[in-house]
Image (cartoon, rainbow, N blue to C red):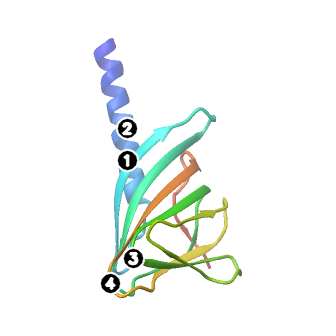
Amino acid sequence: MKTLRTLALALLAAGSALTMHMAHAQAPGLSRTDLLAQDISAPGRQVLQVRVDFAKDAYAPKHTHPGEEVAFVLEGTLEYQIDDNAPVTLSAGQSLFIPSGASHSARNVGGGEAKELATYIVNKGKPLVVMSK
């Protein structure tokens, strides 16, 4: 019974990671590396961590998430626009809070590649990325 429970938990974790990976629509010049998917103490919520690599001039079009995001720039310079607010430009070492459901985009405005560590606190079972209209 213990082996069966361990196997079931392993399959569930693998399925969550696969769902998280498939939820990301890949825009040209973007690549994502899923780092963490973990349930948290808030019922029905989980934390996800993803490294997003932006090629020179890459653009992540407007989208939303079913929860909060903290974007931390690891390398390069990224410009974020949240809802209809003025764009904000961040360099390596700076971070930005993106509220749940806020439509936002990100663009590499530096001279080379850029990297972001995205940490999400989201509702489980919902698509992580929903493209905005």
Amino acid found under the numbered disc labelled 3: Gly
What SS does tag 4 mark? loop
How much space separates mark 2 and mark 4, taking CA atoms? 35 Å
**Residues at badges 2 and 1 in contact (C-beta under 8 Å)?**
yes
Q: Residues within 10 Å of mark 3 (few under 14, many from 20)?
A: many
The percent coordinates of residue 38 (x first, y second) are 46, 39
For mark 4, what is the residue?
A: 112
In the rendered structure, which amino acid carries the disc numbered 4?
Gly
Residue 4 seen from this side:
yes
Q: Do the CB atoms of the residues marked 4 and 3 lie less than 8 Å apart?
A: yes
Q: Is residue 72 left or right of residue 99?
A: left
Residue beneath disc 3: 76
Q: Amino acid at mark 1?
A: Ala
* Mark before the other along the chain sequence, 3 or 1: 1
- Which residue sits at x=66%, y=59%? 100
Q: Which mark identifies residue 17?
A: 1
For the view shown, which residue lies furthest in the front direction? 93
| Residue 103: image location, x then y, percent | 64, 72
Label 2 Cα neighbours within 10 Å, binned few <14 / some 14-19 / many ≥20? some
Instruction: First in sequence, mark 4 or 3: give its number.
Output: 3
Look at 42% across and 53% down and name the residue there.
20
Q: Amino acid at mark 2?
A: Ala
